[in-house]
């Protein structure tokens, strides 16, 4: 699509965001015989898996004891492309407008698209990694301080310090423990908020755990050379030589764009009901962007997959009320 172009073809479903939930939704809408378009802002598919941690093993995808994020993206892409969906890369959706009961206009950085339904699978969107906010640390960003790891082999035989007590920090400790010469995990509390078995695995591994500590200062000339930490209970300070510091202290999500599209949002994302419907008829959301009303939110890939299936099935039924929500064994060949 060239800038300013209008694609007047009306699709059954337009999926916004090509991360795992969007890719799986693309496959599943093919299964439901829906005319499908996927629009992704970046030049490639895969979402966070491709941009933030292609090299990281994921341990909680059914059927795999572990799988590299980039490998999972490859498999999801193969699956998604089976029914020849239209894929638009490098194109960011900047507005959606309901023009009629089953007609939605999507305005992108390249033009206009039309669809009967829209499924938002934008993940955490344009996420910004939370920074430690310590000037001496931020000075070394890219020169020893890394908020994202795209090539774990760059840390081979290096002394690496990871900060955080969530799944990201724990996952990186597990991923780097046999590559780096030493992994030190720093967390400000003695309680972790990551999956228990993984915390136990780290605890019983060669990873050195420093709790409850926070980073106070970073030192070096051209690049990071050492870090000073402070024990939050005793006030004791220690300085350790490290080659790399990887803070994994969460991320911030900007929901303002969805609000401007007329969507109801809360601090967790775009509000959805049990059918993954937003407050705008015909607009659905699944995966990390969705905030299920009156339910828990789990930012897990598998939850995104399940929500994608619910959303696509409900979108199918929304377009054609005679089509069952659940295809089950009802698909009949009409000759
Ligand atoms: P997170 O769950 O928000 O954890 C952030 C961690 O950093 C917390 O332990 C927090 O400490 C600590 N922290 C925050 N600000 C800090 C600061 N200024 N200084 C020191 N420590 C600080 O972030 P995440 O680990 O990136 O995970 C984000 C979401 O993605 C979560 O829902 C997570 O479950 C999910 N995720 C899942 C997987 C998986 O299932 N395989 C992998 C990665 C992420 P406190 O605990 O003291 O607040």
Image: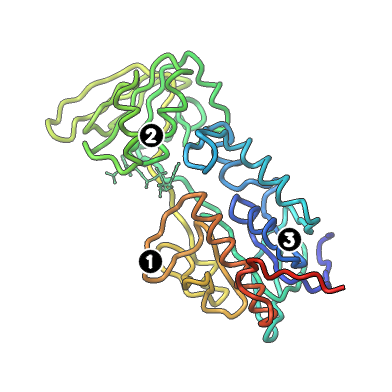
Q: Position of residue 327 (x, y in %)?
A: 65, 68
Task: Name which residue lies at 70% across and 83% down.
Answer: 99
Looking at the image, what colour scheme do you see?
rainbow
Residue 257: image quadrant is: bottom right
Residue 173: image quadrant is: top left
Image depth: mark 3 or mark 1 in front? 3
* Mark 2 C-beta to ligand 1 under 8 Å: yes
Question: What residue would you read off at disc 2?
Answer: 170
Question: What residue would you read off at disc 1?
Answer: 295
Question: What residue would you read off at disc 3?
Answer: 30
Relative to 158, 323 lies left or right = right
* Mark 1 C-beta to ligand 1 under 8 Å: no
Quarter of the picture holding the C terminus: bottom right
Q: Secondary structure at mark 3?
A: helix
Image depth: mark 2 or mark 1 in front? 1
Q: Taking 241 as reference, is 84 above or below it?
A: below
Image depth: mark 3 or mark 2 in front? 3
Quarter of the picture holding the N terminus: bottom right
User: Where on the image, by quarter, is ligand 1?
Assistant: top left
Task: Name which residue lies at 76% across and 70% down.
Answer: 332
Relative to 335, 47 lies left or right = left
Verify CB contact (< 8 Å) between mark 2 and mark 1: no
- The mark nearer the N terminus, 2 or 1, is 2
Q: Taking 229 as reference, is 6 above or below it?
A: below
């Amino acid at each position: 699509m060239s800038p300013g172009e209008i694609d007047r073809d009306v699709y059954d479903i337009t999926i916004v965001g090509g991360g795992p939930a969007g890719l799986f939704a693309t496959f599943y809408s093919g299964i439901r015989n829906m005319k499908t378009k996927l629009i992704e802002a970046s030049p490639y598919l895969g979402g966070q898996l491709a941009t933030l941690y292609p090299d990281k093993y994921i341990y909680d995808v059914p059927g795999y004891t572990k799988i590299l994020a980039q490998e999972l993206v490859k498999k999801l892409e193969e699956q998604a492309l089976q029914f020849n969906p239209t894929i638009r890369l490098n194109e960011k959706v900047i507005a959606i407008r309901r023009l009629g009961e089953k007609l939605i206009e999507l305005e992108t950085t390249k033009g206009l698209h039309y669809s009967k339904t829209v499924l938002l699978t934008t993940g955490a969107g344009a996420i910004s990694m939370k920074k430690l906010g310590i000037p001496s640390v931020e000075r070394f960003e890219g020169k020893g301080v890394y908020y994202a790891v795209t090539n774990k082999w760059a840390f081979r035989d290096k002394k690496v310090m990871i900060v955080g007590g969530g799944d990201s920090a724990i996952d990186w400790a597990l991923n780097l423990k046999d590559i780096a010469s030493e992994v030190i995990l720093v967390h400000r509390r003695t309680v972790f908020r990551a999956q228990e078995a993984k915390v136990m695995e780290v605890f019983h591994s060669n990873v050195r755990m420093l709790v409850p500590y926070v980073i106070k200062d970073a030192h070096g000339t051209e690049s990071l050379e050492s870090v000073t930490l402070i024990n939050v209970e005793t006030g004791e300070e220690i300085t350790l030589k490290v080659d790399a510091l990887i803070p994994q202290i969460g991320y911030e999500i900007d929901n303002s764009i969805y609000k401007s599209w007329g969507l109801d949002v809360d601090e967790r994302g775009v509000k959805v009901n049990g059918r993954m419907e937003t407050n705008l008829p015909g607009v659905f959301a699944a995966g990390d962007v969705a905030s299920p009303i009156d339910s828990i939110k789990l930012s897990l890939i598998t939850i995104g997959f399940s929500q994608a299936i619910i959303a696509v099935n409900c979108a199918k039924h929304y377009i054609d009320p005679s089509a069952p929500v659940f295809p089950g064994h009802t698909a009949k060949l009409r000759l």
